[in-house]
Every structure is written in C-alpha cells, then in structure tokens.
Amino acid sequence: MKLSSFSLAAAVSCALTPAVAFTPAFGVVRNNAAALRPTSLSMSDKPVFDQEQFVAESKEMRLKYLEEQAMFALKIAVENYGNAVFPNAMIAGDCVITHLLHRMGYLSTGKAKIMVVDTFHLFPETMDFLKTIEEAYDFKAEVFCAEGVPVADKAGYDAKYGVDLWKEDIEQYDKVCKVEPFQRGLKTLKTDCMINGRTRWQGFERAWIDQFENAPIGGGLAKCNPIAYWTFEDTFDYLAKYKVLAHPLHAKGYPSIGDAKDTIPIPEDGSTKFVDFKFEGDSVPWLDYASERKGRFVGLANKDGSTKTECGIHVAGAEQTFDRDLWEDGKVKNIANSDAALEIKKAGKGSVVAVYAPWCQFCQAMEDEYSNLATELDVDVYKLRGDEIREFVTSEFNTESFPTINVVKPDGTVIKYESEARDVASMKKFVAESLA
C-alpha cells in the first residue's frame, strides 16, 4: 500500500492545524520536513513507517488529552460547587475517577466526598476493595444501604425486606436497595454536584451524554460525567498506564461488577481477563461498543418485559422517593403491631386491612383510592405495615407481596383481594361480596 505525497501532506497539514507546535514522533518519521518530502511513502517495502508505533503514540496522545479533559471537568465540579459527591461502584471507570480525584488532591482534603451504596447483594470482594482504596488514597467513604438497616447488617435487611425481594419485585428491590439509599446519601451529604462514571461508549441509553448535565434527581442537581467521551479501552489503558488499583474481579473475567446475583463473566467461561494491567485472552468481548455491561442484570426483566439495562439510579423519576408514611391523615386507621392485628381478627366484625410498605410504588399509587374507599365504606378500613413483620403478615394476612388487601370477616376469616384493579369501585364491590 502506498500513500501519495499529496494525501500525506494533506493529512499532516490537517493534523497540525492549529496546534502546529506539537510534533509527535510517529514511528521512525522524525520531523515534519521529512514527512512532507514529495516522495511516495511505502508501508511494506521499507522500514520507513512503523505502523504499530504510530498507533501506540496516537493512543498515548488521545489518553493524555482525555485525562486533561476529565481533570478539568473534575476541577469545575469540585471547585465551582460546594459539595461534590462521587457515588462510587468501584467498576473500572469509577477506579479511573477515584485515581484522578486522588491525583488532584481532592480526596485526602475532603473537597470531594466518596459515597458507596451497599445493596447487601454485592460481591464480597467489592466492600473489601473499598477498604483497600480508602487506605491507598487516604479517604473514608460514606456508605448507605436500605432504610432502617444498619450498615453491613445483612440479617437485618433480610428480616425487614425479605431475602427474595429481588425475585419478588425487581423494581422494588432497585428502589429499596439502590435508588432510595442513593437519594438519601446525596441528601445527607448536601450534594450540589454529583460526579459519576457514565460514558457514551456504554450503550445507546447513554450515547448522547455530555460532561455536564442536569440530573433527573433533586430538582436540577448538577451532574458531572468526567469520562463521558472515553471508550472502555481508554479506561483500561489508563489503569495500565498508572498501575491504578482496580477491582479484583477483573482478573477473574468480569468486565463490570454489580450485584453478585445477576453479574457474570464475559465471555461466560472467564477466558478474557485483565491481570497485572494487561489483557489475557481476546479483549474484544469487553471493549466492543456497548459491551461493558453485558454481564450485568443477567436474567432480569422490567415490568413491561423488556430487558433490564439500568438499576434505576440514572433514569427519569429516580428522584421520586418517599420519606413519609402512607395514609397519615384521613379515615384509614393504623394497626400498630402484630398483637393489634390479631385483636382485629378476633373483634367479631367485618373490616378491611391493607398490608403495605411505604417505599412500595404500588402502595403509593393506590394511596388516594384506598383513602377514598375508607370514606365510602361503613366498616373499619385499616393499614398494616408489613415490611417489618414479614413472617407474621405472610402467615396471618395472605401477604406475598405489597400491597395485599384483605377483608376480615366477623368470624376472623381473612379473604385476599386477588385483583390488580385498585380503584374504589372494584375494591368496594369485593368488600360487599366478601361480607354478604
């Protein structure tokens, strides 16, 4: 293959405008004058042009520019805002950002805060790795988890929300274990600019993001995406260049790391790995466009049947969290505990009991209709919070998921409302038929 002097000159001319002062080596071509000589340049017959070295130097130039661009974005995020917070999942891109913040002195000084959401379903290596980078970069992360559960208390989580919440309702699991603690963390830390590691290379859902945008969170919170324009290959090039601490599961075949329950190696045989800052096996399954998260959310589907690709944190509506109880006012009566619930069953009169969880979006959706039902019935209408007494409501009030509406007959029999229609007319009809 030969490159004409005209095409070469044009290419070099374009490359040098306007940054004429910067002159890379580009293989064995040593200066611009030599590159512009009006002779044909052979890539195969003579060792004039070292293609591999050219590519390597071009990648180095690109990475240098991307680093500077990312650091400039981080400088704006940290110094132009009062409380920049980085929710860190310790995936490859997050490790890059953590290292950049460390290089800039923002971690040890506390100018930028690191926040971590523990879903209680992470790989054990993830929280261990957090301790490693905390020590290496001299910072302490703020860890948030499901509401009402102490950090690292998996047994407490299981007791309150159930071991299989993610199997019963993945959207509720996302809300309880990811979105709500994420939002609570941002609020607690008084965040005004959120730093995160999303990139355009991750897929079509993110293909148009820029380095700064307004997040659909907290009513206009600034959002900084410092590596928005990086490819996944750029990310690993950076990790290798600076010998950056990276999640140990990259060495076991995982390109991205989320919950252990739905994250797998890619390829599944684990043949592609990132070990000692270089790839083993074919890197294409990891580095191809939109391939970074192929091993995430495996086997999970959204309510509409579509394949799950997001955890809920970065989607519109994620800000709609609840920090209050349901049915705080009106005619719906509260059942304080399991003993009180048993007394209602023994009361000898008909009633309606909704077993609910305040964080459940379906319970939230029926709040108004159930309130109106209470005003139209001539029997007592109750609410019973069930997420904290799951075993009890399962055995006594037919509860497998939230909400569960029951009619309690005068003889204490509990009849479950099986319909998904939670409008006043439908519920009222069921009550009348059950108590007839």
Image (spheres, rainbow, N blue to C red):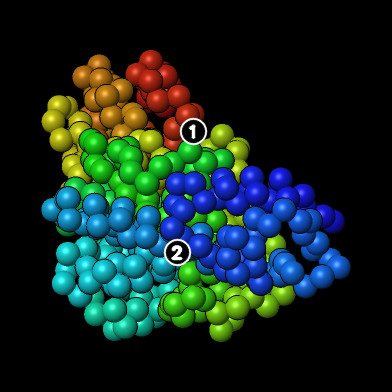
Q: Pinpoint residue 17: horizontal percent, then vertical percent.
A: 49, 46
Kind of residue indicated by mark 2: Lys
Labelled disc at residue 418? 1
Residue 274 as seen in the image, left or right of residue 382: right
Indicate the quadrant where residue 282 lies. bottom right
Res 156 seen here? no
Q: Pinpoint residue 252: horizontal percent, then vertical percent.
A: 60, 77
Q: Pinpoint residue 191: horizontal percent, then vertical percent.
A: 19, 51
Dot 1 surroundings within 10 Å: few (below 14), some, or many (20 or more)? few
Residue 147 as seen in the image, left or right of residue 230: left
Residue occupying image coordinates x 52% and y 51%: 16
Kind of residue indicated by mark 1: Glu
Labelled disc at residue 144? none
Q: Which of 146 and 138 is in front in this view?
A: 138
Q: Which of 315 and 362 is in front in this view?
A: 315
Please determine whether, in this image, residue 261 is positioned above or below residue 300. below
Dot 2 surroundings within 10 Å: few (below 14), some, or many (20 or more)? few
Q: Nearer the viewer, residue 337 or 221?
A: 221
Question: Helix or strand or loop: what does disc 1 sit on?
Answer: loop
Residue occupying image coordinates x 38% and y 36%: 316
Residue occupying image coordinates x 82% and y 70%: 46
Instruction: Locate the C terminus by quadrant.
Output: top left
Mark positioned earlier in the residue sequence (1 or 2): 2
Question: Helix or strand or loop: what does disc 2 sit on?
Answer: helix
Please determine whether, in this image, residue 419 is positioned above or below residue 184. above
Indicate the quadrant where residue 89 lies. bottom left
Q: How far apart are marks 1 and 2 (CA)?
A: 61 Å
Instruction: Locate the N terminus by quadrant.
Output: bottom right
Residue occupying image coordinates x 74% and y 69%: 48
Q: Pinpoint residue 331: horizontal percent, then vertical percent.
A: 16, 27
Res 109 seen here? yes
**Label 2 sits on residue:** 64
